Amino acid sequence: MNIQQLRNKLISKISAINDKDLLLQLETWLGKKTLINTDLKAIQELNIKDSDPVTIRLAGKKSNVVSWEQVFVLGACWVLEEKRIFKLDKPISDHYEKTKYAMSNEPYHADGKLFTSQALYNLVHLETHRSAEDQLKTLQYIFDYFKLNSSDLKISFLGSPNQNGTG
């Protein structure tokens, strides 16, 4: 068996594995990425460029995630559920606090533009079109807005071992 045949055989065997934890370990080993565990507040200080979220944990509930947008949606929906909000009294801005909304009863920003990409929770529209870093900053803003402790949102992601700093 030559090296190419061995490689193909290994890839087919690895692809057949249905164990998420084992696949995660293989991915970190092969991709030279490390599983980093942090919380929403602390992750603001890390560089998440080229990283992949894996799980979030809130109120004892663990959810698998595949994108930073999904982290935002699950976190924002948890806030709305925690505060028992089905409809907002007024729209909530994104972290820039200008004309873009993070949440609104109608899928329109202050300037009248339609939300670019959205999720819906009860009667609340969530704008999900933003960078990974901005997803987390806006989620932090929402936690602060509703006076919730963002350290309670635990995030695990695959990233470079030297994730410190934002540059």
Image (spheres, rainbow, N blue to C red):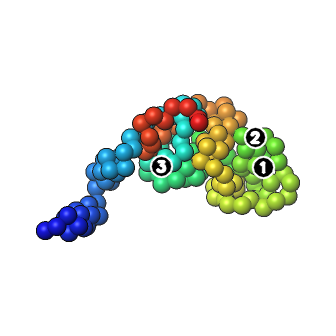
Q: Does dot 3 land on a helix, a strand or a loop?
A: strand
Disc number placed over residue 60 in the picture, else none: none
Name the residue tied to disc 3: 52
Name the residue tied to disc 2: 96
**How far across and how far down the image is residue 151, in percent?**
54, 31
Extreme residue toward the left, this view: 1
Q: What amino acid type is highlighted by mark number 3?
A: Asp
Q: Does dot 2 land on a helix, a strand or a loop?
A: loop
Locate residue 30 relative to residue 87 in the image: left or right. Answer: left
**How far across and how far down the image is residue 62, in percent?**
43, 45
**How far across and how far down the image is residue 131, in percent?**
63, 50
Callout 3: 10 Å neighbours few (<14), some, many (20+)?
A: some
Name the residue tied to disc 1: 100
From this view, report whether residue 48 is shown above or below residue 128.
Answer: above
Q: Does dot 1 land on a helix, a strand or a loop?
A: loop
From this view, report whether residue 22 is shown above or below residue 12.
Answer: above
At x 73% / y 44%, what residue is drawn?
A: 94
Q: CA distance from mark 1 to mark 3?
A: 26 Å
